[in-house]
Image (cartoon, rainbow, N blue to C red):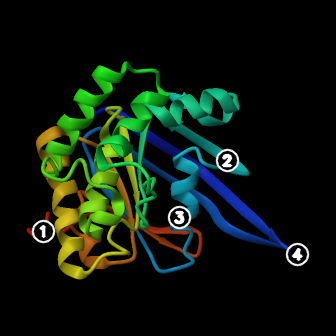
């Protein structure tokens, strides 16, 4: 099976005053095409730092990151931006939708940035919103949508460019339990039916166990990588 993401001996530290604080201390793992992988660990374990690095939002101090065969440390900032736009989809805890745009326009935006024609972008945005069950809400602005609906819009936006991998940072963290499980179920369905590759950061062990594999992160190190005991039904 094709390796979509490879991380080798990733290290990252941040300076706080005169003190250098290590966030990641040598992390290595791979993600295969079509997998749903969770990065699990407590607050402060380095999960979000790791997601930012593999999402090309930041660069590691040491190590190597390969995304779909591209070494992210050997490309320019412009090439990195192109990689993020075309190869990676992002889902954030707080949705990060533009408040003045409708759901449809929020989803359409990455295609517009990529230079897709207005007609094609509109068509694909409508199809993707239907895929996540929001065909009846696509002309509403974020303030007119529930938290769960906003996260579905965010997932549709992440999918719009047919990315090789979708990275989700605590995607249920701003939702109630029931709505959060519905979002996890949606990601599982997209993984199983569409073959979309997901890497999901979570501190919730129940969500972690819905994946194919669990990467357990603690104090900036991988404590273990294991096959999930079962793909839990939600």
| Residue 17 circle label | 4
Q: Which comes sooner in the sequence, label 3 or label 2?
A: 3
Q: Which residue lies at the image location 69% right of the left edge and 59% below the top edge?
A: 12
Q: Which residue is mark 3?
A: 48
Q: Which residue is mark 2?
A: 59
Q: Looking at the image, which is closer to me, 43 or 184?
A: 184
Q: Which comes sooner in the sequence, label 1 or label 4?
A: 4
- For label 4, the SS is loop
Query: For the residues marked 1 and 2, what is the alpha-carbon distance in whole angstroms?
Result: 34 Å
Q: Which comes sooner in the sequence, label 3 or label 1?
A: 3
Q: Which comes sooner in the sequence, label 1 or label 2?
A: 2
Q: Which residue lies at the image location 30% right of the left edge and 78% below the top edge?
A: 205
Q: Which comes sooner in the sequence, label 3 or label 4?
A: 4
Which quadrant holds residue 146? bottom left
Tag in front: 1 or 4:
4
- For label 2, the SS is loop
Taking the image as drawn, is residue 44 in sight? yes
Q: Position of residue 21 (x, y in %)?
A: 75, 72
| Residue 232 circle label | 1
Which quadrant holds residue 233? bottom left
Query: For the residues marked 1 and 4, what is the alpha-carbon distance in whole angstroms?
Result: 45 Å
- Dot 4: few (<14), some (14–19), or many (≥20) neighbours within 10 Å? few
Q: Is residue 101 left or right of residue 36?
A: right
Query: For the residues marked 3 and 2, what is the alpha-carbon distance in whole angstroms?
Result: 13 Å
Q: Looking at the image, which is closer to me, 179 or 233?
A: 179
Query: For the residues marked 4 and 2, what is the alpha-carbon distance in whole angstroms?
Result: 21 Å
Query: For the residues marked 3 and 1, what is the alpha-carbon distance in whole angstroms?
Result: 24 Å
Q: Are marks 4 and 2 in contact (CB under 8 Å)?
A: no
């Amino acid at each position: 099976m094709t390796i979509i993401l490879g991380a080798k001996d990733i290290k990252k530290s941040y300076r706080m005053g005169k003190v250098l604080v290590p966030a990641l201390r040598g992390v290595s793992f791979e993600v295969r095409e079509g997998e749903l992988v969770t990065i699990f660990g407590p607050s402060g374990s380095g999960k979000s730092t790791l997601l930012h690095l593999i999402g090309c939002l930041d660069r590691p101090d040491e190590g190597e990151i390969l995304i779909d065969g591209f070494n992210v440390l050997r490309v320019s900032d412009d090439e990195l931006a192109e990689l993020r736009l075309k190869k990676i989809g992002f889902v954030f805890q707080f949705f990060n939708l533009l408040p003045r745009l409708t759901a449809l326009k929020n989803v359409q935006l990455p295609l517009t940035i990529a230079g897709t024609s207005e007609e094609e972008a509109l068509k694909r945005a409508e199809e993707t919103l239907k895929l996540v069950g929001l065909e009846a809400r696509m002309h509403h602005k974020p303030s007119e949508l529930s938290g769960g609906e906003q996260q579905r819009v965010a997932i549709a936006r992440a999918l719009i460019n047919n990315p090789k991998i979708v990275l989700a940072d605590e995607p249920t963290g701003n939702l109630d339990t029931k709505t959060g499980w519905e979002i996890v179920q949606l990601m599982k369905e997209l993984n199983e039916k569409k073959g979309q590759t997901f890497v999901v950061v979570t501190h919730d062990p129940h969500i972690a166990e819905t994946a194919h594999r669990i990467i357990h992160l603690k104090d900036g190190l991988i404590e273990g990588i294991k096959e999930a005991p079962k793909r839990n039904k939600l």
